[in-house]
Amino acid sequence: MRPSINGVKVPFDKSTQELFAMLDCELPLFYVACEALAYKNDVVSFEKLLSIFQDSDPYKKRIALECLGNHSMFDTATAEKYVFPCLDDSSPYIVRTAIDVLVKHRVAQSHEKIIQLLKSKDEATRECAFFALEHIGKASDFDLILSLYNDKNKRIKNFVPYITLIFADETNWKKAYDLMQRGDHEKARLTACKLLDAFGTETEKGDASHFLHDKSGHVRNYASKMLASFKAVEIEGC
């Protein structure tokens, strides 16, 4: 619950009828009125936001969509009927807001449609779709995620190591490790260390001394602790 939006106080203290009247004001006041309606948490406010959502004005539609996502009555049925179609909207702002709402509510059914938006010509939309995988992604997305490791979009490329750790397991980790262990980005090499630590065999960990000479202190630190722990276990087993 935001106390203000773009410097304008959200009038949570106003009645529903007073908020309805504010919907005829300029956009900044319209925005805060919609936000306040979202927290009335009743059928009247929910239906009003739905009616605004169907407005032809894309700015008002985007705001109503965002605020619908804040309403306690928002559910999967609402998502499927009203939000899913927004993923095909001509306005990239509406598309990205739809992704945000679906991710907020962890609507798993939106997974395939959001995956398709990784092909969008709008880079900000591609980013939004990719970051959404952190919350609604599946293990089956692992190869797709790795395929974006050398993406032209640096924000996507830099996020790949992080999201790789979420979906890595004993069956797929080696692909990511081989790809990232000598990567040009510190996050990639650190991720390789973490993958090796979590899933590597004793032999594989023993051959990882090159991380001790990494140019990144973070990588050297992690590798040092990992190898020290590995050797301690090795000694205990003797």
Image (spheres, rainbow, N blue to C red):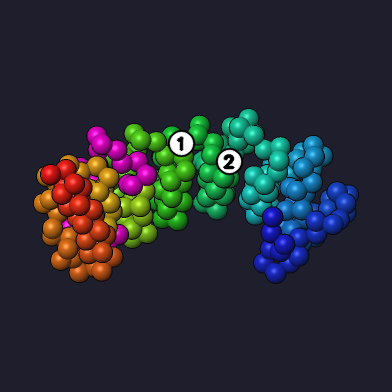
Tag 1 and tag 2, C-beta contact below 8 Å: no
Q: Amino acid at mark 1?
A: His
Q: Which residue is mark 1?
A: 111
- Point out residue 38 in the picture as x, y percentages from the top left corner: 74, 47
Residue 107 x %, y %: 54, 36
Please report the residue visible at 50 percent of the width from the left and 34 percent of the height from the top: 108
Could you tell which of marks 1 and 2 lies nearer the N-terminus? 2
**Range of the magenta residues?**
164-188
In the rendered structure, which amino acid carries the disc numbered 2? His
Q: Quadrant of residue 72?
A: top right
The residues bearing labels 1 and 2 have C-alpha atoms spaced at a distance of 12 Å
Q: Secondary structure at mark 2?
A: loop
Q: Quadrant of residue 201?
A: top left
Crowding at label 2, few (<14), some or many (≥20) Cα neighbours within 10 Å? some
**Is residue 55 depicted above or below 28 in this figure?**
above
Given this view, does label 1 or label 2 mark the residue nearer the observer?
2
Q: Residue at x 88, y 51 (%)?
A: 15
What residue is pinned by disc 2? 105
- Could you tell me which quadrant the N terminus lies in? bottom right
The percent coordinates of residue 187 (x first, y second) are 30, 59
- Tell me if residue 179 can be seen: no
Mark yes or no: residue 232 visible. yes
Mark 1, other Cα within 10 Å: few <14 / some 14–19 / many ≥20: many
Judge from the rendering whether residue 28 lies leftward or rightward of residue 76; answer left or right.
right
